[in-house]
Amino acid sequence: MNLNELVGYFKDDLFLPEIKADTKESVLEELVEPLLKNDIIKNKRVILETLKKRETLGSTGIGHGVAIPHCRTLAVSNVQLVVGHSEQGIVYKSMDGEPVHLFFLIVAPPQEKSNLYLPILGKLVEMLRDKDLRKRLQTIHDFNEFVTVFQGG
Amino acid sequence: MPKSQLELLVLYQDIQLMLYDAEEQKKMGFQVEGVEDLKIALSEMEETIQTRYIRTYERLKTRYTRPIAPVSKDVCLGCFATQPTSYKARAWSDKQIFTCENCGRILYWIH
Ligand SMILES: [Zn+2]
């Protein structure tokens, strides 16, 4: 998975420039909302339950202000990526206890022919190890700015 | 109700894929609890599935992510090759395990 392929999964419709939620649970709900709005899922219940279940196995808040909640679920038929940003940061029970500014929600079907779930997850983690990138992403305001910064512009 | 060898193999494949997902995530730095439980479940299943089936499965595993393929309307959904119609009845009645003549995957009939 290269950078351009990953960026291809970012969608304007699946981007939240400023998250309103202020708890871990409500953040997950807000991140799932665009999937419902765009008719990608039929209801939020199953997907939310699965995401919460995943969090009980270990927080997907990987530290340094980044969280990558993810799960496989029958609720989607293709890999989907929702990006959310919070200027002030949200308490998320992260590995380092720091508030989260950047959310990348990844959901994929259980039987996935394309096999993209893990490569997308891996590429995101790799990219977000870059301290500089994380810092620049914290101050973005809209989708285009997000993509430009993510691509190193 | 005791599960057939094929049902157990399908379950075995599911748990293996779950374990693979979890271990890959751990390598990336995610916290994932329960990995040990999956490993225990797998080794317990290895006791209940006949060795020759495990061997076939593991051999196929080197080639395919999912060594077991569903069959629909006599077509292997792993490679889309048509299977002899007689297989289905025999698979149901004798609980015999068949592999695809074309791709070698273990077959299970979904209807
Ligand atoms: Zn086949």
Image (spheres, coloured by chain):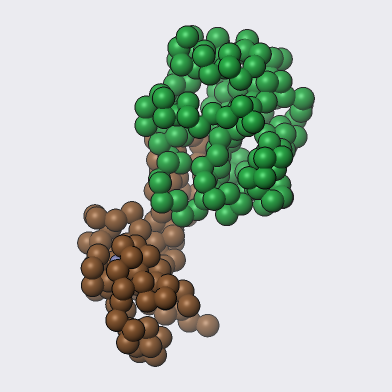
Q: Which x, y percent locates residue B44?
A: 40, 66
- Side of A81 relative to A3 (left or right): right
Picture residue at 54% right of the left edge, 28% below the top: A10
Q: Which x, y percent locates residue B21?
A: 43, 46
Q: Which x, y percent locates residue A32?
A: 67, 39
Picture residue at 46% right of the left edge, 41% below the top: A117
* Location of residue B63 by image quarter: bottom left
Picture residue at 40% right of the left edge, 68% below the top: B70
Q: Is residue B68 visible?
A: no
Chain A: colour as depicted:
green
Quarter that holds the N terminus of chain A: top left
- Against A139, residue B35 (above or below) is below
Q: Which x, y percent locates residue A18?
A: 71, 20
Ligand 1 falls in quadrant: bottom left
* Location of residue A137 by image quarter: top right
Picture residue at 34% right of the left edge, 84% below the top: B85
- Side of B86 relative to B38 (left or right): left
The chain painted brown is B
- Side of A60 relative to B90 (left or right): right
B109 or B41: which is nearer to us? B109
Q: Is residue A87 visible?
A: yes
Seen as rendered, the residue at the extreme bottom is B93
* Location of residue A84 by image quarter: top right
- Side of A137 relative to B47 (left or right): right
